[in-house]
Image: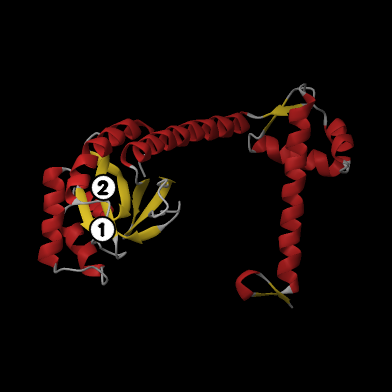
Amino acid sequence: MTVGKLGHVVKPSTLAVEGMHVRSMQRVVAILECVAEAHVPASAARVATGTGLSLSTVSRIMRDLAEDQLLDRLDDGSYLLGARVFRLVRTAREGGDAMATIHRVLADLRDRTGETASLNVRREDVRVCIASVDSRHELRRVVPVGDAIPLVGTATGDVLMAGLPAAEQTALIDRARHADGSRVELLARLREAAAQGWSVQRDGLISGVTGVAVPVRSGERVVAALTLSGPTTRLSPEAVEKCVPDLEDAARRIAPWVREP
């Protein structure tokens, strides 16, 4: 027996299968890299020499990769990188460009307001941070990417829930056991968020922290929430109202770069 991650016991047979999968992936990567580095159509024999794998193994894997459009097989039996590889690269570049733009907008918002700026999306009953730029203050709210907290009773949750059907709002509130306030009070918060276009929560889930959020829209649909958060001592009611126009401007700038879930 071998102890794996998180203390799980892994049987030897399982380890053997996992090892085979790892070796198979390493072979695929090595073959794709060899074809890419050739800069001309590459034969199976050339790739076998370049990777140190047997010709039979390389030929089999290259045929499989061609079927999956990761390689293109020419009439003479040689191979080039396939269309699917280039689609993956294009998608990755587009996603990288989008995230780089989002981070620039968040950094600008942080510099204009002094507080931590984060972009959050809804996942079932929680909000998940997908991008964040921390305040430069020594005392600050840190929102790690991937951080997930309940929707109900938070400024971010208010703007993500405000446009939902009443029945869905009620169901979310009824499932929330942590939230302060009655169903009537929490629904009133959502109506207020919808009416004014933003929401603020002081000393909510985290004592001493205030958050203020605005929706990010695709057309009429709310696809994300843009949030500023920091110590309540700095985010007074006057400071919050002063931040809202900057938040709304940043939300408009980010909107074209946020993909709908």
Q: Residue at x 51, y 34 (%)?
A: 96
- Check contact, mark 1 vs mark 2: CB within 8 A: yes
Amino acid at dot 2: Ala
Q: Position of residue 20 (x, y in %)?
A: 76, 58
Which image quadrant: the C terminus?
top left
Q: Position of residue 221 (x, y in %)?
A: 24, 40
Q: Residue at x 11, y 45 (%)?
A: 195
In the picture, measured across the screen, residue 53 lies left or right of residue 26, that is right
Q: Position of residue 117 (x, y in %)?
A: 36, 45
Q: Which mark is residue 24?
A: none
Q: Secondary structure at mark 1?
A: loop
Q: Is residue 65 above or below residue 203?
A: above
Q: Residue at x 86, y 35 (%)?
A: 50
* Residue hosting label 1: 154
Q: Secondary structure at mark 2?
A: strand
**Quadrant position of residue 47:** top right
Q: Residue at x 19, y 58 (%)?
A: 169
* Residue hosting label 2: 213
Q: Position of residue 177 (x, y in %)?
A: 26, 72
Along the line of sight, which residue is nearer the eye, 97 or 111? Answer: 111
Tally the numbered discs: 2
